[in-house]
């Protein structure tokens, strides 16, 4: 049965002969722009299939003539970052900390990396600026009880103070009142004396000074400026771990004190504790 193409009377175009509810479809050609886009797209596909990684196979994929590989690129970038990191971690681990302090490029990295480490691990007790709070010493200012040099700071971080580390530092302020070593009146007098040590206007009572020399100087020093071997703090400066008001100082002498600084050897890597020692030393206001 032959079928005569039908011409649409309005547009004058041939129809496809299909009809839906009285509407007939014109057999118009694909517009040139669309056709051109399709052809260009096909050409691009063929060329990129040849040049770039394209088709998956059983054991791999077609790699393309250009040899572009995102995985290689990522691996290369990761390797470069690792090299850059290992260069400065090698320096921190390989040379004495004193030398690292003198390396300003390295210290820039320490300031950047150390700040995150310090905030994550230390700021809860020592504050974000290291200035401490009640029961937690200011480690940014004043003389440190165990010593200010960077190796000492590193050791304190590593083993802690009164901690569960087998090599921990021990700091023990004796309970002169509670353990009956001194009468209450002496402790009241010593409280005034200790408060006076950081006040240039204060008068020293020779009798109380003698009580201090006899009972306290062995740990805190004749000049009361602290002895780092015992972790006994400087009592002449304005920085107090346990408070510098009359009640707090009285309580320090009457009841004793033993602060607890955790050890970090198990929790942080050697690189991290060394980095933190550099960071803490760097954050400190130099002591005259
Ligand atoms: C759980 C609270 C706590 C955390 C966390 C903590 N510390 Fe301490 N830290 C202390 C206390 C308390 C002392 C003082 C111990 C004492 O009084 O004998 C101290 C003492 C120190 C000292 C010695 C101060 C001196 O006078 O010699 C340094 C240095 C120090 N901390 C650094 C750090 C660093 C660095 C971190 C983070 C890795 C850290 N601490 C985390 C509580 C803490
Ligand atoms: C056995 C050594 C030792 C003797 C003796 C000693 N102290 Fe201490 N004292 C310490 C240590 C160590 C600390 C720090 C404790 C800590 O931080 O855990 C300390 C802390 C203190 C503090 C608190 C300081 C602060 O920053 O809050 C005061 C005050 C003090 N001593 C006064 C005295 C007086 C006064 C005497 C004499 C009656 C005395 N000490 C005798 C070792 C000693």
Image (spheres, rainbow, N blue to C red):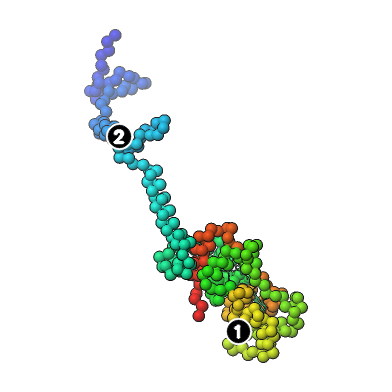
Name the residue that disc number 1 marks: 223
Q: Nearer the viewer, residue 246 or 207?
A: 207
Tell whether 217 sits left or right of 96: right
Q: Quadrant of ligand 2?
A: bottom right
Q: Residue at x 59, y 85 (%)?
A: 199
Element assignment for label 2: helix
Disc 2 to disc 1, C-alpha distance: 84 Å
Q: Nearer the viewer, residue 8 or 180?
A: 180
Name the residue that disc number 2 marks: 50
Q: Residue at x 53, y 60 (%)?
A: 270
Q: Residue at x 37, y 33 (%)?
A: 55
Q: For the view shown, which residue lies furthest in the top direction? A: 1
Q: In which quarter of the view is residue 248 placed? A: bottom right
Mark sitting earlier along the chain (2/1): 2
Q: In which quarter of the view is residue 33 placed? A: top left
Vertical side of 247 occupied by 58: above or below: above
Asked if residue 25 can be seen in this view, the reply is yes
Q: Residue 122 appears at what percent x and percent y? A: 56, 64
* Marks 2 & 1, CB-CB < 8 Å contact: no
Vertical side of 280 occupied by 25: above or below: above
Q: For the view shown, which residue lies furthest in the left direction? A: 12
Q: Residue 19 appears at what percent x and percent y? A: 34, 19
Q: In which quarter of the view is residue 186 placed? A: bottom right
- Tell whether circle 2 marks a residue whose Cβ is less than 8 angstroms from ligand 1: no
Vertical side of 276 occupied by 247: above or below: below
Tell whether 143 sits left or right of 37: right
Element assignment for label 1: loop
Q: Residue at x 42, y 67 (%)?
A: 103
């Amino acid at each position: 049965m032959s079928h005569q193409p039908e011409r649409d009377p309005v547009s004058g175009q041939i129809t496809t002969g299909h009809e839906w509810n009285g509407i007939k479809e014109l057999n118009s050609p694909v517009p040139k722009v669309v056709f051109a886009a399709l052809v260009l797209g096909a050409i691009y596909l063929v060329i990129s299939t040849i040049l770039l990684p394209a088709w998956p196979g059983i054991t791999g994929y077609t790699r393309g003539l250009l040899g572009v590989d995102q995985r290689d690129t990522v691996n290369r970038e990761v390797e470069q970052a690792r090299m850059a990191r290992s260069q400065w971690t090698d320096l921190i681990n390989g040379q004495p900390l004193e030398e690292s302090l003198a390396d300003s490029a390295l210290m820039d990295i320490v300031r950047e990396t150390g700040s995150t480490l310090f905030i994550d691990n230390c700021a809860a007790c020592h504050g974000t600026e290291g200035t401490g709070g009640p029961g937690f010493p200011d480690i940014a200012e004043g003389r440190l009880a165990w010593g200010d040099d960077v190796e000492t700071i590193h050791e304190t971080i590593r083993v802690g103070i009164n901690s569960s580390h087998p090599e921990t530092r021990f700091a023990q302020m004796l309970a002169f009142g509670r353990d009956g070593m001194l009468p209450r009146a002496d402790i009241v007098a010593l409280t005034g004396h200790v408060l006076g040590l950081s006040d240039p206007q204060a008068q020293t009572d020779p009798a109380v000074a003698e009580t201090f020399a006899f009972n306290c100087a062995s740990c805190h020093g004749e000049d009361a400026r602290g002895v780092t071997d015992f972790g006994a703090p400087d009592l002449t400066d304005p920085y107090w771990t346990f408070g510098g008001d009359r009640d707090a100082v009285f309580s320090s002498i009457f009841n004793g004190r033993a602060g607890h600084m955790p050890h970090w050897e198990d929790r942080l890597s050697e690189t991290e504790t060394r980095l933190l020692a550099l960071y803490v030393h760097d954050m400190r206001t130099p002591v005259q």
